[in-house]
């Protein structure tokens, strides 16, 4: 009997214990910068009692942590801010919004995108580089213009496309294989002034993340990389202005709350005045030319309640080059994004973002004048324009299932319109030319991905993305034969499907922590690219055309495998990584001999299709803290292509194949007032086609070529130096009570920045051509170099 | 288009510099070059035979000995071109003229091999007119200068696929060539500006309209991309040749028209 009682009681206790065992509740909230209200991306929230358990804030500063019921001490930290803790008795779902206090400031530029000190070891993401805005501020660049696109080229695996060239190459891919997103809107031409500057005004930016390896499943559409750039939200506490006045350009940023701590806005603008220097040039016609560009970034956000937040952001930029009213050439991007964040459910585990995005890139070339009056018969203008325009609707969810699983899933649809050539002639022009036909397509995708923590050491991110690309009418669509001649042209009606492509991209990456200071990672990703930039010249030109996949152009496909070893030394002060990758590409595009791609209605007939492969090793050693910081990066790599109709179907190097690529960056804080920096880059020259003979034909001497890309440009190297002098951020006044001098913070902060580009004035080859010398009649190789030593001065302020 | 972009680049970059550098090149094996151009004007047709030379050497291009050049057509004619004693390497027949709508065959026999080519002529072409618009000032010119922006006008034969080249002379100096095909205006009236040329007061403009076949058009078109070498030109490549047998060059038979105007 007694045994039975014991047994019975034990059973009840078991049940009772089981019934009340571990009900879980969710602690969620937002972490913000206490001085400005900016959301903190990548800040850590940890549970002291449960080591290894925690969460990281997402790009809106939101975190969600599901824990068993109980009392906990929660610690939060973010680089550049004071740490803090709070106690919580988690017996229901709770929300806790925290504002962190910044520690040390330099001109008020706090790093709101804190990277955990050991994030490179613990994060399962592979092939990812995060740029801090303070790195960008301190690295000297051309004309003193801080440029995020130029700064990422100092990282391993990312190569500059060269001076005068807009793009960059990531792991051997072409410059159109990088998806550049500004608050989620794609930017099709991220360069000003034929590539010397990018469209990004670093004063308006908050976070820059570059995915080099397989990007996670929520990204797709480009083979080589995703550059995800986020704009600042705007100071939610008080009005703030900052700006700079420089030799070539000036910028101004204004930010203020709409309603304190609920909403804010930021407006940032920049304009160059390069044309002021043209009268100094001896070139014909230069003094009457017009040459400038401007950017405007504007953003507003508002918190509607505990669960809802809306954002609107836009970018508008334009380059203008012209001569009086006779000739004009202008181009630019317009992007706009409207977003709505919503936190779903009682437990607040589901975070959703709905976005509507608009993006347009267009250029216009104008000849002739309209005489300034309204009389059409005096209008002698001839205009050619081209544009690409996207409308994009997307829905992204993050579901914080529990401490071991975070699910991301979503869908998006993009409608692309391509207008390759629109022609307008004024009334006085006696002829008309037809426009080149528009093309339309719809790109859509569905994805799901899970970040899975297994035990204390292993993290996996796995998922897949299913995508579809459909070419639709209206329009006349032609097909071509193997020689590029039109075979037939078929008319399609509105929304009638001409061609559709499906793609399934699995994505996988994993991280195994060997110990507290080191880890190994491995990953695989497949990506599809449906838009292709058609450009057959050395320099990138604003008239390069984006073409969609179609009956004639198949989507490009890449499979990338990567493995890496990451190790930190000296308490995370020194970071080392080594990554090896191999990329296999299909349906790669190249051009027939002598292809004409500008304003060609049958440009698809000029394209050839083949395969490509790229492989390499990337090494990085980085010192992250202390008076002296900086990094050394080295990439050893190869990129090659193979086409049946080029170089007799053998593997040949792609133009961007660069065997060695070295960057050394050093930043030294001599004192609170003075910082000096230097960067040195070296890379192997591009593969180029040089002649192997010459002959006379049709009255001219022309070159004879035996192989494409068989030679190399000379190696490129350059040293840049910079120095920043900060004025004191306090002033000394006499305390009226004690009579002693005391320090009071200044409202107006300012600094001077001096930089020298190409400090040892090396003439790096921009282009090499073979010309006949007029006096001697000899053929000689002539090298054109763009920049020798260029100094620059900028004055920056903030209040 | 490309010229304009090149001007834009140069205007921007006043700090740039050029210098001659030494680049070692792999010298290729020498190849034979055959250039044949037949016109419907007496004394103008010729065939040139030469060889390629190394890039850096200065001498005239080598010619070959014992070359026979024979042109035949599809209506039974045979024409032997003999070497011009004043121009070694050039073979002429002073009385030869092309006829419209005829196919011509070239046969060049040398000690290094035999090379053949085919070209066809189409119907006769004629300019309708040249006219101009007066401009004061203009891109790259003094604001007080008067210049003339000139247009050519001619009709295309709708029944044929035509390719044209308009060769423009300013005061007897060749300034430009404008290639065209009739894809966008087959059977219609074509009007086009000589957009890269400016003519001044009292200048003489002579334009020659040349009608050619597709291989010739392809050759001339790809030739433009070979010679310029500016940053906006395409990856350099050999022009597309229509000579069989392994020689470089091209062979073309043309019908033409000429028109001249003098500006006020």
Image (tube, coloured by chain):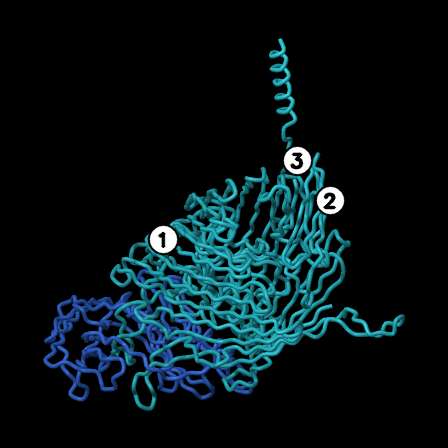
Chain colours: A cyan, B blue
Q: In this view, does A734 lie above or below A568?
A: below
Q: Mark 1 vs mark 2: which is more N-terminal?
A: 2
Q: Mark 3 lies on which chain?
A: A
| Marks 3 and 1 on same chain | yes
Between A697 and A101, the residue placed more toward the observer is A101
Q: Where is residue A578 in the image (x, y as percent from the top left)?
A: 43, 58
Q: Is residue B140 above or below residue B178?
A: below
Q: Which chain carries label 2?
A: A
**Is residue A481 left or right of B205 when viewed as pictured?**
left
Q: Which chain carries label 1?
A: A
| Marks 3 and 2 on same chain | yes
**Residue furthest to the front:** A2
Nearer to us of marks 3 and 1 is 3
- Which residue is the site of mark 2? A305
Q: In which quarter of the image is residue A70?
A: top right
What number of labels is visible?
Answer: 3
Discs 3, 2 touching: Cβ within 8 Å: no
Q: How crowded is mark 2: few (under 14 residues within 10 Å), some or many (20 or more)?
A: few
Nearer to us of marks 3 and 2 is 3
Between B196 and A798, the residue placed more toward the observer is A798
Q: Mark 3 vs mark 2: which is more N-terminal?
A: 3
Tell me if residue B55 can be seen.
Answer: yes
- Which residue is the site of mark 3? A25
- Which residue is the site of mark 1? A584
| C-alpha gap between disc 3 and disc 2 | 22 Å
């Amino acid at each position: 009997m007694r045994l039975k009682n014991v047994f019975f009681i034990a059973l009840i206790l078991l049940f009772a214990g089981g019934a009340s065992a571990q009900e879980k509740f969710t602690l969620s909230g937002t972490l913000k910068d206490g001085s400005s209200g900016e959301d903190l991306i990548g800040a850590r929230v940890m549970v002291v009692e449960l080591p290894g358990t925690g969460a990281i804030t997402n790009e809106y500063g939101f975190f969600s942590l599901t824990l068993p019921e109980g009392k906990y001490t929660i610690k939060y930290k973010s680089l550049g801010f004071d740490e803090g803790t709070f106690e919580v008795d988690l017996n229901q779902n709770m929300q806790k919004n925290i504002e962190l206090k910044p520690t040390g400031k330099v001109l008020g530029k706090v790093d709101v995108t804190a990277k955990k000190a050991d994030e490179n070891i613990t994060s399962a993401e592979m092939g990812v580089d995060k740029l801090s805005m303070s790195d960008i501020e301190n690295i000297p660049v051309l004309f003193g213009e801080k440029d995020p696109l130029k700064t990422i080229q100092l990282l391993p695996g990312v190569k500059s496309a060269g001076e005068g060239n807009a793009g960059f190459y990531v792991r051997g891919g072409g410059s159109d294989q990088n998806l550049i997103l500004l608050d989620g809107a794609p930017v099709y031409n991220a360069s000003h002034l034929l590539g010397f500057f990018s469209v990004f005004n670093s004063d308006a930016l908050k976070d820059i993340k570059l995915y080099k390896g397989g990007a996670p499943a929520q990204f797709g559409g480009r083979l080589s990389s995703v550059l995800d750039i986020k704009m600042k939200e705007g100071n939610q506490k008080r009005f703030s202005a900052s700006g700079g006045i420089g030799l070539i350009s000036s910028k101004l940023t204004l930010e203020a709350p709409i309603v304190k701590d609920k909403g804010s806005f930021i407006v940032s603008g920049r304009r160059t005045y390069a044309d002021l220097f043209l009268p100094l040039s001896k070139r014909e016609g230069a003094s009457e030319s017009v040459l400038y560009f401007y950017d405007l970034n504007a953003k507003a956000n508002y918190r509607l309640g505990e669960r809802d937040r809306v954002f609107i952001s836009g970018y508008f930029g334009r380059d203008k080059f012209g001569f009086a009213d006779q000739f004009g050439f202008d181009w630019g991007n317009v992007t706009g994004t409207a977003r709505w964040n919503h936190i779903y459910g009682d437990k607040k585990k589901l975070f959703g973002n709905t976005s509507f995005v608009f993006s347009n890139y267009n250029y216009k070339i104008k000849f002739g004048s309209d005489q300034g009056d309204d009389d059409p018969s005096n209008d002698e203008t001839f205009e050619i324009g081209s544009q690409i325009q996207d409308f994009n609707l997307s829905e992204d969810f993050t579901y914080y299932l529990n401490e071991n699983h975070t699910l991301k899933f979503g869908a998006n649809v993009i409608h692309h319109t391509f207008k390759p050539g629109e022609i307008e002639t004024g009334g006085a022009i006696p002829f008309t030319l037809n426009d080149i036909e528009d093309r339309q397509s719809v790109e859509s995708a569905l994805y799901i991905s899970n970040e899975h923590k297994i035990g204390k050491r292993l993290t996996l991110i796995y998922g897949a993305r299913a995508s579809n690309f459909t070419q639709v009418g209206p329009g006349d669509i032609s097909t071509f034969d193997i020689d590029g001649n039109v075979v037939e042209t078929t008319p399609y009606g509105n929304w009638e499907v001409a061609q559709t492509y499906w793609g399934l991209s699995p994505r996988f990456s994993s991280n195994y922590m060997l110990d507290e200071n080191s880890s190994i990672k491995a990953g695989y990703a497949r990506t599809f690219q449906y838009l292709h930039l058609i450009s057959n010249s050395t320099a990138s030109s604003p008239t390069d055309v984006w073409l969609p996949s179609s009956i004639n152009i198949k989507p490009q496909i890449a499979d990338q495998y990567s493995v890496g070893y990451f190790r930190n030394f000296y308490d995370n002060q020194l970071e080392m990584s080594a990554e090896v990758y191999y990329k296999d590409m299909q349906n790669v595009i190249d051009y027939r001999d002598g292809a004409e791609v500008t304003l060609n209605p049958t440009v698809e007939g000029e394209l050839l299709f083949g395969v490509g492969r790229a492989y390499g090793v990337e090494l990085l050693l980085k010192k992250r803290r202390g008076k002296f910081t900086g990094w050394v990066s080295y990439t050893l790599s190869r990129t090659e292509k193979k086409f049946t109709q080029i170089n007799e179907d053998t593997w040949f190097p792609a133009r961007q194949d660069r065997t060695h690529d070295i960057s050394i960056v050093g930043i030294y804080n001599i004192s609170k007032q003075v910082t000096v920096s230097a960067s040195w880059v070296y890379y192997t020259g591009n593969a180029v086609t040089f002649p192997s003979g010459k002959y006379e034909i049709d009255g001219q001497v022309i070159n004879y070529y035996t192989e494409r890309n068989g030679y190399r440009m000379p190696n490129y190297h350059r040293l840049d130096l910079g120095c920043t002098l900060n004025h004191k951020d306090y002033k000394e006044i006499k305390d009226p009570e004690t009579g002693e001098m005391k320090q009071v913070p200044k409202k107006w902060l300012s600094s001077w920045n001096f930089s020298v580009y190409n400090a040892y004035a090396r003439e790096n080859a921009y282009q090499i051509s073979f010309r006949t010398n007029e006096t001697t009649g000899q053929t000689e190789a002539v090298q054109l170099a763009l920049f020798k030593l260029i100094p620059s001065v900028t004055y920056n302020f903030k209040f | 288009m490309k010229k304009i972009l090149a001007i834009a680049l140069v205007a921007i970059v006043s700090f740039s510099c050029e210098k001659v550098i030494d680049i070692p090149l792999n010298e290729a094996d020498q190849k034979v070059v055959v250039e044949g151009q037949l016109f419907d004007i007496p004394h103008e047709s010729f065939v040139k035979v030469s060889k390629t030379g190394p890039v850096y050497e200065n001498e005239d291009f080598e010619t070959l000995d014992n070359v026979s050049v024979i042109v035949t057509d599809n209506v039974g004619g045979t024409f032997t071109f003999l070497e011009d004693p004043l121009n070694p390497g050039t073979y002429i027949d002073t009385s030869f003229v092309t006829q419209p709508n005829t196919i011509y065959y070239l046969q060049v026999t040398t000690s290094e091999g035999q090379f053949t080519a085919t070209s066809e002529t189409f119907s006769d072409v004629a300019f309708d007119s040249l006219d101009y618009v007066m401009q004061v000032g203009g891109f790259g010119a003094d604001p007080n200068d008067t210049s003339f922006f000139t247009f050519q006008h001619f009709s295309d034969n709708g029944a044929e696929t035509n390719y044209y080249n308009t060769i423009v002379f300013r005061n007897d100096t060749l300034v430009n060539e404008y290639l065209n095909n009739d894809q966008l205006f087959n059977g219609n009236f074509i009007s086009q500006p000589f957009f890269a040329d400016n003519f001044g007061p009292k200048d003489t403009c002579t334009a020659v309209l040349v009608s050619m076949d597709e291989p010739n058009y392809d050759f001339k078109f790809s030739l433009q991309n070979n010679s310029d070498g500016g940053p906006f030109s395409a990856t350099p490549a050999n022009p597309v040749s229509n000579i069989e047998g392994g020689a470089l060059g091209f062979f073309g038979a043309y019908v033409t028209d000429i028109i001249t105007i003098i500006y006020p």
